[in-house]
Amino acid sequence: MPEIEEVLPKYLQIAGYLRDQIVRGDLPPGTEVPSERELAATWRVARPTATKALQALRQQGFVEARRGAGTFVRDVNPAAPRARERYERAAAMGTMYSDAESVAFPFVGVVESSAYVATQLGVGEGELVVKRQRVISNEATGPTELSTSWFPAATAEVAPKLLVAERLRGGTVPHLVEVLGLRGAFARDQVSARLADDEERLALGLPNPSAVLVYWLVVFDSDGTPVEFDEAVYPQDRWAFRQDYSITV
């Protein structure tokens, strides 16, 4: 009989929240993270639980303790934020990007869909689709992500801002939820690795050859119809895939 999955232990939830802030850039290197006492008060947990949360972050290499000073974010090259982290930041702060990030739009317009884009969007190969391409850079490390979003061309008729080369508050998915009235939207992720093509190497400043991490995200409406397909390409030094979950034994 199926069983309801248990949620993560509280200390892992706290550690995950702080880790996402570090990955997104909201807690840059050198920033002091909340103390055990502050975490215990904020999350309404016992002091030992807060201690375990900080210990987990130290073990994962995200923070370091400085005797007599506190716990600080390490000066490491973290993973680039995934879609989940960006959407969570948008919901909490109204923007998908941290203050340390900038966004450029190499291309925004209508193109004919390639075979793999058509498959993910559920349209015919060669059909017109909207393409929004962005290069996301960190002020400290340079380009960190080449992100391309595709939409059925008809979507632009009701969401014309998709064809404007500027950031949409909260990102494209919240914008589509607002203009299309989407309810019960869900997403599917797929992660793979391959060699970067010429366009990706140029955008990310990579040598030839270079391996990249490719992250696909397809957003569906409540009927299971694809409404957006995203492809995020990351340089090899930004590779990471981390997930905490309970194990049923």
Image: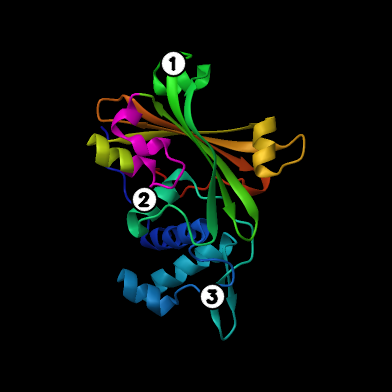
Q: Is residue 3 visible?
A: no
Q: Height in image: 179 above or below 155?
A: below
Nearer-N-terminus badge (1/2): 1
Image coordinates of residue 169 in percent, x first then y, are: 36, 50
**Residue interval drawn in magenta:** 154-174
Q: Specify the quadrant that holds the C terminus.
A: top left
Q: Nearer the viewer, mark 3 or mark 1?
A: 1
Task: Assess whether residue 3 is covered by the magenta stretch.
Answer: no
The amino acid type, in three-letter code, at marker 1 is Glu
The part of the image, by quadrant, that contains residue 156 is: top left
| Horizontal side of residue 1 vs 56, given as left or right | left
Residue 209 at x, y percent in the picture: 76, 34
Looking at the rendered structure, the kind of residue marked 2 is Arg
> Which image quarter: residue 75?
bottom right
Which residue is depicted at the point 43% across and 19% down?
A: 128
In the rendered image, residue 60, in percent from the top left (x then y), is placed at: 57, 59
Residue designated by label 1: 127
Neighbours of disc 2 within 10 Å: few (<14), some (14-19), many (20+)? few
Is 169 colored magenta in this rendering?
yes
Q: Which comes before the other along the chain, label 3 or label 1? A: 3
Q: Secondary structure at mark 2?
A: loop
Position of residue 23 relative to residue 51, above or below, is above
Which residue is label 3 attached to? Answer: 71
Three-letter amino acid code at the position of disc 3: Thr
Residue at screen point 45% across, 46% down: 166
Q: Residue at x 43, y 76 (%)?
A: 36
Residue 169 marker = 2
Q: Answer with the quarter of the image where residue 145 lies.
A: top right
